[in-house]
Amino acid sequence: MPKADIGLIGLAVMGQNLVMNMNDHGFTVAVYNRTTSKVDEFLAGPAKGSKVVGTRSIEEFVAALKKPRRVMLMVKAGEVVDQFIAQVVPHLEKGDIVIDGGNSLYTDTQRRVEELGKKGLLFLGSGISGGEEGARHGPSIMPGGAPEAWAAVKPIFQAISAKVEDGTPCCDWVGKGGSGHYVKMVHNGIEYGDIQLICETYHLMRAAGCSNTEMAEIFSAWNRSELLSYLIEITAKILAYKDTDGSHLVDHILDAAGQKGTGKWTSIDALELGMPLTLISEAVYARCLSALKEDRVTAAKVLPGPAPKPLKDRKEFVESLRQALYASKIVSYAQGFMLMREASRQYGWDLNFGAIALMWRGGCIIRSIFLGDIKKAFDRKKDLHNLLLDDFFKKAMTGAQSGWRSALARSLEWGIPAPCMTSALAFYDGYRSDRLPANLLQAQRDYFGAHTYERLDKPRGQFFHTNWTGTGGSVSSTTYNA
Ligand code: NBP
């Protein structure tokens, strides 16, 4: 007799913890894993004494599920997801649901929703964030795909997800197609930005002579301000953490960053959509540059640059860094929401931005008090065009601006790179400029390639070409934007 409410394939760190979370909330979960010995280890270990049903073949796994069957995959993204879909689908019936909870590329999800849809099956691509602890005690869950599947999955997902203070789950319906994985992808991109901003702050504080212990205290204090967030909290703990010999562990860690691709995907999609996602892209490049450790060690011996100078007032500098971090973070989120707004428009998803801010408010790696402020901004104005134009954030930017500029002036003077903070300020100054030098740029394009230009004194959409040299023709190139 089938008895499991849901089945989960993939018993690595995320899968195991999600299963135990579902079990704690009263759901019976059937599990399967390619290496079936892991099923036995799980049943004898973390799942001992639980209602979890272990299975050792796909047939046994599917047979253990109540109808409509809910099959969740928590496996390595990419081909492995397609392989498991191919194995499971022959055993499913119309109306059954397949959920991919891994970090899949949203275009793959889009394709899978369509392919399974043709077979009468409902596919969901659901981003899940919060790492091991989130999976176990309440992650942020971002489901999208076949809308008909949502009602059958909602009770389980909302029960196991994180909750904000008033009990609202950090899980809501995102939208059609690949939108759930898209929103998770942007979440990860924003995470790249947040992490890099904190690292730049740390780099500048260290250059100013702050010790690890002082920095741990500063980040702890900031975690009681508008910067309160999971990433600031763990940064304080990391900076205070001592190795077995009593020295600070952070000083022994190699400065070469890893990455698994979601930041890069976000930047690539921003380029595709023509959105200026400068901060997240800089964060991806900062990881790439850090990974060139050997090159940097060589260059450090050869290339000259300035050195940090002693400060008269370190406290004031630390305060300016706090402002730089806060203002840059606002720009990063403004850019992230700009990207999702454009994606929603171009891909036809009708995303609910307030709901997305709420989903990220708890459970996930970027959880913060700040996301509550973003939610409030979208509550004030559902179709808010840009976060920077909301009164709360406008005021915050005004308050943080002088510190932001002076902190970055120091970074330039001292030769300490702060690519994300600097690009954030360049974006801010560009976004608030009613005139940029693109008039000259358009003239250059028209000069060398007859690419045409629009005029300030003529309606938009009317294009002109000038025979700049007197020797060119009057034929212009076709006008389009890639
Ligand atoms: P992994 O991403 O390490 O995947 C492990 C699972 O994939 C195991 O069940 C493994 O089976 C299976 N697998 C692999 Br690897 N190669 C396979 C193959 N060729 N054929 C069949 N199965 C294969 O686990 P995870 O870290 O728990 O993450 C699961 C998903 O969730 C991923 O998409 C990940 O990106 C995403 N995610 C992870 C985190 C996190 O903090 N780790 C957070 C949020 C989302 P085996 O046991 O037989 O090798």
Image (tube, rainbow, N blue to C red):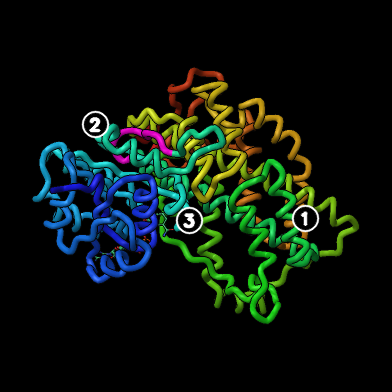
Which amino acid, by three-letter code, is at mark 2? Glu
- Nearest to N terminus: mark 1 or mark 3: 3
The residue to which callout 2 is attached is 148
Q: Residue furthest right?
A: 312
Q: Position of residue 92 (x, y in %)?
A: 12, 46
Q: Do we see residue 270 in this rendering?
A: no
Query: Are dots 1 and 2 in contact, CB under 8 Å?
Result: no
The residue to which callout 3 is attached is 133
The residue to which callout 1 is attached is 410
The residue that appears at 75% across and 65% down in the rendered structure is: 213
The boundaries of the magenta stretch are 171-178
Which amino acid, by three-letter code, is at mark 1? Arg
- Nearest to N terminus: mark 2 or mark 3: 3
The mark closer to the camera, 1 or 3, is 3
Q: Position of residue 64 (x, y in %)?
A: 17, 51
Left or right of residue 3, residue 338 in this image: right
> Residue 362 or 189: which is nearer the viewer?
362
In the rendered structure, does residue 364 fall within the stretch colored magenta? Answer: no
Query: Are dots 1 and 3 in contact, CB under 8 Å?
Result: no
**Judging from the image, what secondary structure is the residue with disc 1 in?**
helix
Prevalent SS, magenta region: loop
The residue that appears at 69% across and 62% down in the rendered structure is: 203
Tell me if the residue at label 1 has its CB under 8 Å from ligand 1.
no
Could you say which disc has been placed on residue 178 in the image? Answer: none
Left or right of residue 303, residue 78 in this image: left
- Quarter of the image with the C terminus is top left
The residue that appears at 24% across and 56% down in the rendered structure is: 53
Give the spatial CA distance, label 1 vs label 2: 55 Å
Q: Where 165 falls versus 365 (above or below)?
A: above
Q: Crowding near pointer 1: few (<14 within 10 Å), some, many (20+)?
A: some
- Nearest to N terminus: mark 1 or mark 2: 2
Give the spatial CA distance, label 2 vs label 3: 30 Å
